[in-house]
Amino acid sequence: MATGQLFSRTTQALFYNYKQLPIQRMLDFDFLCGRETPSVAGVINPGSEGFQKLFFGQEEIAIPVHSTVEAACEAHPTADVFINFASFRSAAASSMAALKQPTVRVVAIIAEGVPESDTKQLIAYARANNKVVIGPATVGGIQAGAFKIGDTAGTIDNIIHCKLYRPGSIGFVSKSGGMSNELYNTIARVTDGIYEGIAIGGDVFPGSTLSDHVLRFNNIPQVKMIAVLGELGGRDEYSLVEALKQGKVTKPVVAWVSGTCARLFKSEVQFGHAGAKSGGEKESAQAKNQALRDAGAVVPTSYEAFETVIRETFEKLVEEGKISPVKEATPPQIPEDLNTAIKSGKVRAPTHIISTISDDRGEEPCYAGVPMSSIVEQGLGVGDVISLLWFKRSLPRYCAKFIEICIMLCADHGPCVSGAHNSIVTARAGKDLVSSLVSGLLTIGPRFGGAIDDAARYFKDAYDRGLTPYEFVEGMKKKGVRVPGIGHRIKRGDNRDKRVELLQRFARSNFPSVKYMEYAVQVETYTLSKANNLVMNVDGAIGSLFLDLLAGSGMFTKQEIDEIVEIGYLNGLFVLARSIGLIGHTFDQKRLKQPLYRHPWEDVLYTK
């Protein structure tokens, strides 16, 4: 066990099992104390490497993350404190790994419930190698104005209130972390404050004892008096009694052992800590308090009087000239986190993204204000979800059904079209699903599947301006623009695209109006008079019918319809639908274990 000071203003720690809040509290304490370097040198997260962003005052810093204890110790040889936030299942193994590192002097184990047999092994190894274990079941410790472990002393407001941002003259040790916070406050109220405070933890076998730390405090010149808070159960306090009797502690010790109320109960009572259970008269709070009093410690008659005897002992040391008044300093203001400041109404900050289609902040995600559970309970389908996420409203059922039909009819068109061909070649090159899908999607455009928006745009403009099919087609011809939605490489006037027929049949049976579709049919009649392959294709059918869906539903203004067409909503239908087929072709090639594709020579015209 170390015989002197454990921490200083240059102490750095390794933090095991990343926890954002306690690390940030350590860094905020560093800034409050005016430290030049952060007290957390690195984080150990098993299986992870990289960096974690945190704040050191107003400066955002990157703290390295290591996957093993060994790697962290090698990277940060000056970090000699190991703060272990592992669960009770892995705390012992990770703590032992840290103790075995030559650079680590102090290990703090936060977890409760560490098996006692494991704790005994840690204690034995630490004592044999002159190292310190604080815990298990501890909140940690603090050296005022220098260094603190994890959540010790709580919030920054509490730390400032307890004057822990600068050193005082009192060494304090307790079993309880919660009561430590209470005593920090008490001591700051009636003395010049804490120099160092340690909570050894409430387990039956603490890694270091009350007397271990009292003897350390006795060797630290800046500590002028010592305060001890014990509790019933166990015999730890008696080692302090022996140290006092043997004259090993020369500084005033003010002590109290909590749990005097246990005698009021008829049967044995287990208090909060594993070790807080009296196993006999000698382990009672009354017996321990009397033993400490007999050994020379200043022991009050009750906990309520503890504050008084601390004040009296401190004032006596001041009168004797053994304690000089501490010069008070105003600690710097800790920058407040933006989220906290916003919640408290102190600041306002602009957002970076606007979303009007979904919200995931509640108990469940909502699509355009409709809870996901409601969508499922109502038996809504993919078409309904698209209507909510794309159009921000629930469209009539026939509209949702039409959307679903479009998706089904456009999902695939065989392996020979350019999109499927690209996905197949990419999949056979051994690329992953996303790469294969994207290679196919990138072919979608004016010549392949991307003419739905243009078809809708031109048909709508012509119909709204009252152009006859002749005027529309001939006008497009003069501009040198092919009529989108008209023309097919395979289909003819006497061999219509079955998909077009299915869509038109559904619309005539369900849509309240099909004026744009009928206009497109009239245009097709005129173009077929010119050439048998100038038949309406699926792009033209979907484009014209979607205009009828938008206009006929009565749920969209003219401006909204124009915006939908302009933005590219309708091509989105083809992209969504064809993704299904492209994914299918990718899986098909991988399932068949097809080799790398090479285009045959005989299918290439080599020419000068």
Image (cartoon, rainbow, N blue to C red):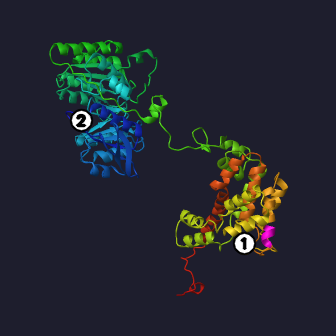
Q: Residue at x 38, y 19 (%)?
A: 259
Span shown in magenta:
524-528
Q: Residue 555, labelled with which disc? A: none
Q: Which of disc 1 and disc 2 is earlier in sequence?
A: 2
Residue 575 visible in the picture:
yes
The single residue placed furthest to the right in the displayed view is: 509
Q: Secondary structure at mark 2?
A: loop
Residue 489, image x and y in percent?
Answer: 71, 75
Residue toward you, 322 or 347: 347
Three-letter residue code for mark 1: His
Q: Residue 96, located in which quarter of the rendered image?
A: top left
Q: Is residue 485 left or right of residue 233?
A: right
135 or 391, which is in the foreground?
A: 391
Classed neighbour count for the residue bearing mark 2: other residues with Cα under 10 Å, few (<14), some (14–19), many (≥20): some
Q: Secondary structure at mark 1?
A: loop
Residue 16 rendering spot, x and y as whole percentages:
36, 44
Foreground tag (2 vs 1): 1
| Three-letter code, disc 2 | Arg
Q: Position of residue 533 (x, y in %)?
A: 75, 74
Residue behind mark 2: 9
Along the viewing direction, whichever of 508 and 317 lies nearer the viewer = 508
Residue 95, horizontal then vertical, whole percent:
33, 44
Which residue occupies 26% across, 27% down?
166
Residue 491's place in the image compared with 21, above or below, is: below
> Pointer 1: what residue?
488
**Residue 109 appears left or right of 443:** left
